[in-house]
Amino acid sequence: MPDSPDSNRRTVAGYEQCAHDYAATVPKQPTGLYATALRQLVELLPGDGRVLDVGSGPGWDADFLETLGVRVHRTDVTAAFREVQAERGHRVDALDVLTDEIADTYDGILMLCVLQHFERADLDGVLDKLANALTAEGAVLLSYPLGETEYWEHANSGDYRVVLWTGEALDQRLRRAGFVVVWDAHQDESSGPWRSVLARKAA
């Protein structure tokens, strides 16, 4: 198994190189399953709900949530993504969920297209940290590619660690962290099947 800090640094370095191209490529408006997943999260929030966006990237999902009246705290470990959003007038705080503490408490947490970059040994710690940052019965929305393998994806911009999870294995980790899965859905992408899963902190 690769060393976790080194693995994370290499992956973040890749995103530093491709952030602007990524922002230009990814659709600005969530559609289909992704829009449905975000709406499912909003349905579990109180009227003045506040959401932590971990790995906000270009910020399109945060934009969408804000159109639905949600207050979003945008964060990203990648400085280039923070710059992309700053150019659009948004404040994005630096947060490395592997090493940084989450100081505030939120009604919901959004972490899309992020957890596949964590080593298996690191996931329990991340999920525990998310659970501790949620209010009672708060909710977390995750998306990740399905599978059982792990590998390095090599691209022109750099190297990206990819660790796949089956639905059963990921749900077991969620239960271990004190979550109950309340909704999930699958969608086929060019890279393979992806899953969105919404889990609520157990009462």
Image: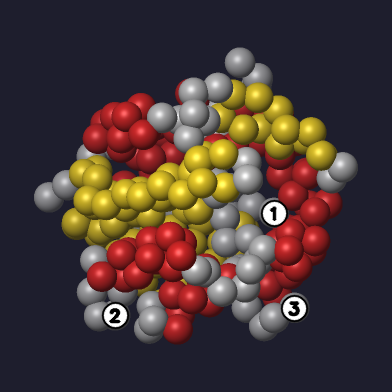
Between the C-alphas of marks 1 and 2, the distance is 28 Å
Which residue is labeled 3 in the image? Answer: 87
Residue 122 in view in this figure: no
Mark 1 highlights which residue?
Answer: 78
Residue 152: x percent and y percent? 71, 28
Q: Residues within 10 Å of mark 2 (few under 14, many from 20)?
A: few
Question: Position of 66 compared to 140: left or right?
Answer: right
- At label 1, the amino acid type is Thr
Percent position (x, y) of residue 68? 39, 81
Compared with 191, 164 (above or below) is above
Q: Earlier in the sequence, mark 3 or mark 2?
A: 2
Find residue 176 and report its horizontal and vertical position in percent.
26, 31
Locate the N terminus by quadrant.
top right
Q: Is residue 120 above or below residue 100?
A: above
Residue 48 shows which numbered tag? 2
Distance from the alpha carbon under mark 1 to that under mark 3? 15 Å
Along the line of sight, which residue is nearer the eye, 74 or 190? 190
The residue under the point 57% across, 61% down is: 56
Q: Would you call the spot at circle 3 few (<14 residues within 10 Å), some (14-19), or many (20 or more)? A: few
Q: Is residue 37 above or below residue 174?
A: below
Q: Secondary structure at mark 1?
A: loop
Residue 171, by quadrant, is: top left
Which residue ends up furthest to the right in the rendered image? 156
Q: In the rendered view, does 151 fall on the left or right side of 105? A: right
Mark 1 and mark 3 lie on one chain; the one further toward the N terminus is 1
